[in-house]
Image (cartoon, rainbow, N blue to C red):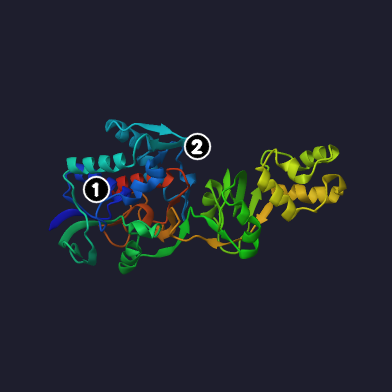
Amino acid sequence: MKVDVLIIGGGAAGLMCAFVAGRRGRRVVVLEHNERVGRKIEISGGGRCNFTNVNTTAANFISRNPHFAKSALARYTPPDFVALVERHRIRYHEKKLGQLFCDESARQIIDMLLAECDAAGVRVFTGCRVEGVSEGESFRVRTSRGEFESESLVVATGGLSIPKLGASDFGYGLARQFGLKVLQPEPALVPLTLAPGDLKQFQPLSGISVPAVVRCDGAEFAENVLVTHRGLSGPAVLQISSYWSRGRALSVDLLPGEDARALLERKRAAGAELHTALSGHLPRRFAQVWAETFAPPRPLRAYTDAELEKVSERLHDWRVLPAGTEGFQKAEVTRGGVSTDELSSKTLESRRVPGLYFVGEVVDVTGHLGGYNFQWAWASGYAAGENA
């Protein structure tokens, strides 16, 4: 089958690209290897799809080139996607920190994208495995559903996160086949694991969540930290995981906005124990275990000023050395991917191979937690769809 634009991948970025190109009168085909499109959309936001974030800026994204995402994000914004959602009469609500969710189901976003594809004359083939890609005067793609030929080829295959949904390294392999540089893909927005010794101390606290500020490599996030049976998770840890690398310690401020030294001095004067002094600010069980592990085993009144200062400093700068991550199985997204040096920031087209585009998670642009990765999918898909 001969078409104008062939898109490999029926996720958020691929479907957006498809109907935008179709509206321009292009003959568009989407190839999806799963039996249905939008598998990752389906499970996002607890099944309600956190489809964008009203606070989106380029500062919410990580990339070897921090400026790369600016062009696409400026030309397709959260209000643009919200207008599409409203046109399809999908009810939504805003949660904390600017995140927008469907009131009902993530399936509504998938149905909306498919309706737009249908209206634009896009053909979608599911259960279609790509077996090989070659380039001559046009791109030839061999699949389990026959051969396709196209003037433009858009790779929207996603990253390695959540392999049970069919994630693979296909897009990276294709980029390398055409001579493009790929930055090492790594799990991002992922829980962190602790070494056995640290885990032994904190495993009894599994399920307890603590408000904190977590810092690493110049980044910081003020959100909850969740103790798990394998280590640490929760929004603050998922966020900082995108900046963490093996061998680096996290700095955790357990009393953000408080003066720990002044608090402990007041409690010492009142004759309190350390864990009771902290339990007004931290979950009681967490305060008890933390005090038993990291502070002298004496009542506060027996602390010297130097000891009080040391504990105060640790409360604001508790150093935690993760052993690793829970891997791509638990990662929400993939950090790294096709190098932005290889692509036009305006069109997402390869600088080396005319007509070849990469969009969405397969590119080295990784959003923070909270709808930002969807906004990158919409914006990059739109940019390629306008030009392919």
**Disc 1: CA contacts within 10 A as few (<14), some (14-19) or many (>=20):** many
* Residue 40 location (% of width, % of height): 35, 50
Q: Residue at x 66, y 48 (%)?
A: 286
Q: Which residue in the rendered view is the most extreme toward the left?
A: 1
Which label number is shown at residue 232?
none
Q: Which residue is mark 2?
A: 97
Secondary structure, mark 1, is: helix
* Residue 162 location (% of width, % of height): 39, 57
Which amino acid lies under the numbered mark 2 shown in the image of this protein? Leu
Q: Is there any visible trace of residue 376 in the rendered image?
A: no
Q: Which residue is mark 1?
A: 18
* Residue 346 location (% of width, % of height): 35, 48
Please give left or right for residue 95 compared with residue 117 in the image: right
Which amino acid lies under the numbered mark 1 shown in the image of this protein? Ala
Please tell me which residue lies in front, 319 or 196: 196
Position of residue 335 relative to residue 132, above or below, is above
Residue 356 lies in what quarter of the image?
A: bottom left
